[in-house]
Image: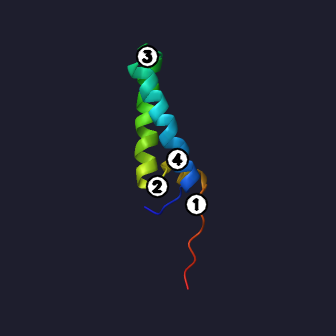
Amino acid sequence: MKKNMGTADRVIRTLIAIIVTVLFFTNVISGILGIVLLIAAGIFLLTSFVSFCPLYSIFGLRTCPIEKTD
């Protein structure tokens, strides 16, 4: 897997995951919506750790700088 996520994208996804997790465990969001958002937060966290988003590769997006090879 080649990296396709930049630093800003990774930080934003991590912050969103943390916020959703805190809101879920403080019962601000609950029920089906809470579970769905918690799963999405887990996916955000996983993709930010590996710097690869499968949806980005499907649509041909990159938020990281292109690596130059000499």
Rendered position, 68 above or below 8: below
Q: Earlier in the sequence, mark 3 or mark 2?
A: 3
Q: Earlier in the sequence, mark 3 or mark 4?
A: 4
Front-lying residue, 68 or 27: 27
Asked whether the residues under the numbered discs 1 and 2 touch, taking CB atoms below 8 Å apart as contact, a structural biologist would say yes
Please, what is the three-letter code of the amino acid marked with disc 1? Cys
Q: Earlier in the sequence, mark 2 or mark 4?
A: 4
Identify the secondary structure beneath mark 3.
helix
Asked whether the residues under the numbered discs 1 and 3 touch, taking CB atoms below 8 Å apart as contact, a structural biologist would say no
Q: Residues within 10 Å of mark 1 (few under 14, many from 20)?
A: some
Real-space CA distance between mark 3 and mark 4, rounded to the nearest whole angstrom: 26 Å
Q: Nearer the viewer, mark 3 or mark 2?
A: 2
Q: Quadrant of the N terminus?
A: bottom left
Which residue is labeled 3 in the image? 32
Real-space CA distance between mark 3 and mark 2, rounded to the nearest whole angstrom: 28 Å
Which residue is labeled 1 in the image? 64
Which residue is labeled 4 in the image? 11
Q: Residues within 10 Å of mark 4 (few under 14, many from 20)?
A: some
Q: Quadrant of the C terminus?
A: bottom right
Identify the secondary structure beneath mark 1.
loop
Real-space CA distance between mark 1 and mark 4, rounded to the nearest whole angstrom: 13 Å
Q: Nearer the viewer, mark 1 or mark 4?
A: 4
Q: Earlier in the sequence, mark 1 or mark 3?
A: 3
The residue shown at (45%, 34%) is 18
**For residue 49, side relative to residue 5 (left or right):** left
**For residue 10, side relative to residue 1 (left or right):** right
Please, what is the three-letter code of the amino acid marked with disc 4? Val
Q: Which mark is residue 51?
A: 2
Q: Nearer the viewer, mark 1 or mark 3?
A: 1
